[in-house]
Image: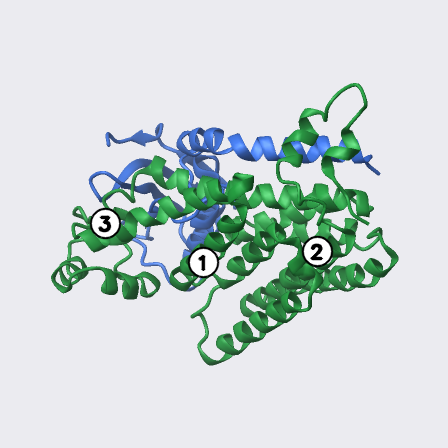
Chain colours: A green, B blue
């Protein structure tokens, strides 16, 4: 049950249309079979559902409990329907409802909005069949490239990483302070800690400037490696390492998990094994245990 | 139900829109004074941005002390700031004023809302836009007043 994006829009007289060419650029070389995408969507919905339940419990907001329960129901529906070779009923209203709930308040921010938009895009693809598996996978692969690209490019545009001014202003943020302590000379670290917040704050040491500039360079680099077909294998490796590196500092593990699930679509075979299922469940168990033992240390 | 070809066109359009989205997003953010992280900024940790709110309220003896937010007023301000980060100038503090007027039992409020952004080159976290509002709670419970002047864009 393999699919190829280019095939479905190819005619004998003409080559593939622009849409097929755009998506075909992120083709999975025929490895995007239905079970792969069904497993990916099941795990994504499972992850989103657990994340929403956590938000609901932490914020005492029933709307998240409801959206979490719906997302988990969608995950169960995906798992059940995947045996029939198509996802038909479980996705549209379920995912749409999650998206609606998740985006009802600006405080929810970017991660929920991203998840909701991607799931909404999948809902539009219902019924998800073998023929559409490659199209869905291509959209998610493009999303990985664009997230990295824009994350790096916008850091360049706002210009707060060339001299480390963004990181310098995070000196009192526990998530960033430890890595700045490692990268900066002790005198610079101490000077930043006691600096007047109304005055200029930048990094001056080689270590600090390397750390700061490595952030956007690694993001743009990963985007390029993932975009170029011949470097995608290296790009996947570098990207997973970069996401882990970012989340070791930012601790937004919930988003990191979403991103890694998306990145693993660059190696669709991953979804054929049980390892990725164990990874998602294990990550959530670890998140849950951490939340009980040290609330607020890891962010979702 | 969409066809395979229609789905491909839709997804390709999404890819193209996402590809160019940061450009209009940049100008939208600048125009309405919102947080660059918000409104599907597609990138976080780009720069520092904050919304500052200063409030004074009229007492029975016509003094205007500065509000020290706590309890209901603190939550109301936090919610306003969250919306303001996303909607920028499009979100005026009318609801905040109404909530505070009832919570404080006052009929007059002066609110200053300021955007604080990081000048990456100089490393200074500075106020770049300040707006002033004055509200009166009428006898019938309705809110009067609003923005006092056009937004005050300070030179960078």
In the rendered picture of this protein, how many numbered marks are placed on residues? 3
Q: Label 1: how many residues lie within 10 Å, few (<14), some (14-19) or many (20+)?
A: some
Q: Residue A72: which quarter of the image?
A: bottom right
Q: Among all residues in the image, which is located at the extreme bottom? A: A293
Question: Residue B128: x and y, percent?
Answer: 29, 36
Which numbered disc covers residue A209? Answer: 3
Between A7 and A72, which is closer to the camera in this rendering? A7
Question: For the point 58% across and 48% down, which residue is it?
Answer: A113
| Residue underneath mark 1 | A241
Question: Which mark is nearer the camera, 1 or 3?
Answer: 1
| Residue underneath mark 2 | A41
2 and 1 marks in contact (CB < 8 Å): no
Q: Is residue A278 above or below residue B57?
A: below
Measured Cα–Cα span from mark 1 to mark 3: 20 Å
Pinpoint the chain carrying mark 1: A
Q: SS class of the residue under badge 1? A: helix
Question: Residue B4: x and y, percent?
Answer: 80, 36
Q: SS class of the residue under badge 2? A: helix
Q: Label 2: how many residues lie within 10 Å, few (<14), some (14-19) or many (20+)?
A: many
Question: For the point 77% across and 64% down, which residue is it?
Answer: A76
A221 horizontally vs B132: left or right: right
Answer yes or no: is residue B62 visible.
no
Q: Is residue A227 above or below residue A86?
A: above
Question: Residue B90: x and y, percent?
Answer: 48, 35
Question: For the point 35% across and 63% down, which residue is it?
Answer: A175
Between B49 and B149, which is closer to the camera in this rendering? B49
Q: Is residue B27 above or below residue A298?
A: above
Pinpoint the chain carrying mark 2: A
Do circles 2 and 1 both sit on a common chain? yes
């Amino acid at each position: 049950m393999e699919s190829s994006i280019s095939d479905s829009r190819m005619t004998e007289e003409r080559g593939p249309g622009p849409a097929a060419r755009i998506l075909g650029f992120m083709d999975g070389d025929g490895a995007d079979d239905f079970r792969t995408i069904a497993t990916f969507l099941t795990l994504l919905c499972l992850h989103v559902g657990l994340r929403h339940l956590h938000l609901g419990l932490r914020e005492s907001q029933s709307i998240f409990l409801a959206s979490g329960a719906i997302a988990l129901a969608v995950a169960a529906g995906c798992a059940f329907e995947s045996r029939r070779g198509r996802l038909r009923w479980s996705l549209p209203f379920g995912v749409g409802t999650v998206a609606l709930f998740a985006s009802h308040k600006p405080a929810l921010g970017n991660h929920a909005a991203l998840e909701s938009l991607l799931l909404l895009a999948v809902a539009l693809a219902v019924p998800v069949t073998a023929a559409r598996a490659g199209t869905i996978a291509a959209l998610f692969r493009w999303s990985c490239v664009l997230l990295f690209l824009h994350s790096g490019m916008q850091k360049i545009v706002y210009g707060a990483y060339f001299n480390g001014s963004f990181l310098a202003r995070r000196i009192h943020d526990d998530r960033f302070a430890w890595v700045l302590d490692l990268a900066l000379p002790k005198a610079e670290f101490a000077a930043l800690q006691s600096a007047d917040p109304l005055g200029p704050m930048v990094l001056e040491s080689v270590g600090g400037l390397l750390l700061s500039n490595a952030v956007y360079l690694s993001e743009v680099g990963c985007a390029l490696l993932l975009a170029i077909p011949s470097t995608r294998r290296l790009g996947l490796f570098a990207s997973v390492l970069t996401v882990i590196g970012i989340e070791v500092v930012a601790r937004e593990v919930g988003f990191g998990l979403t991103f890694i699930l998306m990145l693993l679509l660059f190696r669709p075979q991953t979804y054929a094994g049980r390892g990725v299922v164990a990874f998602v469940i294990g990550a959530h168990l670890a998140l849950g245990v951490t939340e009980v033992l040290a609330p607020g240390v890891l962010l979702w | 139900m969409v066809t395979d070809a229609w789905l491909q066109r839709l997804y390709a359009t999404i890819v193209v829109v996402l590809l160019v989205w940061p450009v209009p997003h940049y100008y939208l953010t600048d125009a309405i004074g919102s947080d660059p992280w918000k409104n599907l900024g597609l990138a976080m940790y780009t720069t520092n941005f904050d919304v500052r709110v200063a409030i004074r309220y009229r007492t029975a003896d016509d003094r205007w002390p500065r509000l020290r937010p706590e309890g209901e007023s603190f939550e109301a301000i936090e919610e306003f700031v969250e919306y303001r980060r996303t909607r920028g100038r499009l979100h005026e503090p009318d609801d905040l004023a109404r909530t505070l007027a009832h919570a404080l039992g006052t009929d007059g409020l002066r609110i200053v809302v300021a955007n604080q952004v990081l000048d990456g080159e100089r490393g200074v976290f500075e106020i770049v836009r300040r707006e002033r509002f004055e509200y009166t709670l009428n006898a019938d419970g309705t809110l009067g007043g609003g923005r006092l002047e056009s937004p005050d864009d300070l030179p960078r």
